[in-house]
């Protein structure tokens, strides 16, 4: 069973701090990795995708990928109360599969 | 505006009735997906389709059916055989299956009593 694991949280950080969200995955053949943000009662919104080892930055968000350790992370700098949401890690199915496997998500609270 | 639409936003049905959830996209994406999300849980794949007139079962297809007669449309029918149909249903699309990001519609919240 291919799995994506995330700490369910909640992760609570003060406004202006760095929030660090982590994800591990079991399928060594996975090639594409995604972070989605989901506000309560809403649908997931794509915020980052990463395909190669290392860091990828987009504004206040940085995704980090380490395929050897099967580890993906998302850093949110200068956290704002509006960042309070559930963050879903998603990983494509390797070996020619056609599915994307989603983690259960980490709830983030940013305190003003 | 390009995007994915789902209707209705909220749906209430009596147990034993079939119900069809609509999903339309104008992004010209080849692949479309249906997921179910229960409170505090991740997304579970119901069905997916890579091209018109072709679709595959996901991890929890029992009690559901789909069709893909047009590239833009991928409706989901929740049948009376689905034992616990109350959930948040999400439709998504992607330029290609698996390797690329998926974009989600706003979702349909189905309540069956």
Image (cartoon, coloured by chain):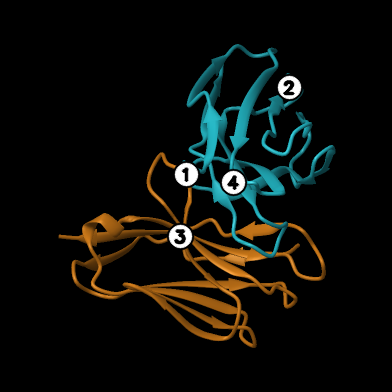
Chain colours: A orange, B cyan
Circle 4 is placed at which residue position? B27
- Cβ atoms at labels 2 and 1 below 8 Å apart: no
Q: Nearer the viewer, mark 4 or mark 1?
A: 4
Q: Earlier in the sequence, mark 3 or mark 1?
A: 3
Pointers 2 and 1 within a single chain: no
Q: Is residue A19 above or below residue A68?
A: above
- Cβ atoms at labels 4 and 3 below 8 Å apart: no
Would residue B73 appear left or right of B81 to someone viewing this image? left
The chain under label 3 reads A
Location of the C terminus of chain A (image quadrant): bottom left
The chain under label 4 reads B
Q: Nearer the viewer, mark 2 or mark 4?
A: 4
Circle 3 is placed at which residue position? A8
**Rendered location of residue A7, percent (x, y):** 47, 65
The chain under label 2 reads B
Q: Using the numbered discs, state the Cα–Cα distance from disc 2 to disc 4 in whole angstroms.
A: 29 Å
Report the residue at 48% width, 38% height from top.
B106
- Cβ atoms at labels 2 and 3 below 8 Å apart: no
The chain under label 1 reads A
Circle 2 is placed at which residue position? B79
Question: What number is the disc on residue A43?
Answer: 1
């Amino acid at each position: 069973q291919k799995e994506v694991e995330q700490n369910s949280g909640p992760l609570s950080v003060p406004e202006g701090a760095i929030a660090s969200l982590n994800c591990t995955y079991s399928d060594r053949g996975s090639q594409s990795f995604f972070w989605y943000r989901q506000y309560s009662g809403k649908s997931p919104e794509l915020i980052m995708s990463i395909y190669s080892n290392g860091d990828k930055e987009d504004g206040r968000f940085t995704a980090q990928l380490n395929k050897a350790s099967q580890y993906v992370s998302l850093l949110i700098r200068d956290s704002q109360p509006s960042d309070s949401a559930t963050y879903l890690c998603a990983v494509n199915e390797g070996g020619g599969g056609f599915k994307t496997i989603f983690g259960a998500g980490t709830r983030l609270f940013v305190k003003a | 505006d390009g995007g994915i639409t789902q209707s209705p936003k909220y749906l209430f049905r009596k147990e034993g009735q079939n119900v069809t959830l609509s999903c339309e996209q104008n992004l010209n994406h080849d692949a479309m997906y249906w997921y179910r999300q229960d409170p505090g849980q991740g997304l579970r794949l119901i069905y997916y389709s890579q091209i018109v007139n072709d679709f595959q079962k996901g991890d929890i297809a029992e009690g559901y059916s789909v069709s893909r007669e047009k590239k833009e449309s991928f409706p989901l029918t929740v049948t009376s055989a689905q034992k616990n149909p109350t959930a948040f249903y999400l439709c998504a699309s992607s330029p290609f299956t698996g390797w690329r990001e998926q974009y989600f519609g706003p979702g349909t919240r189905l309540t069956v009593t």
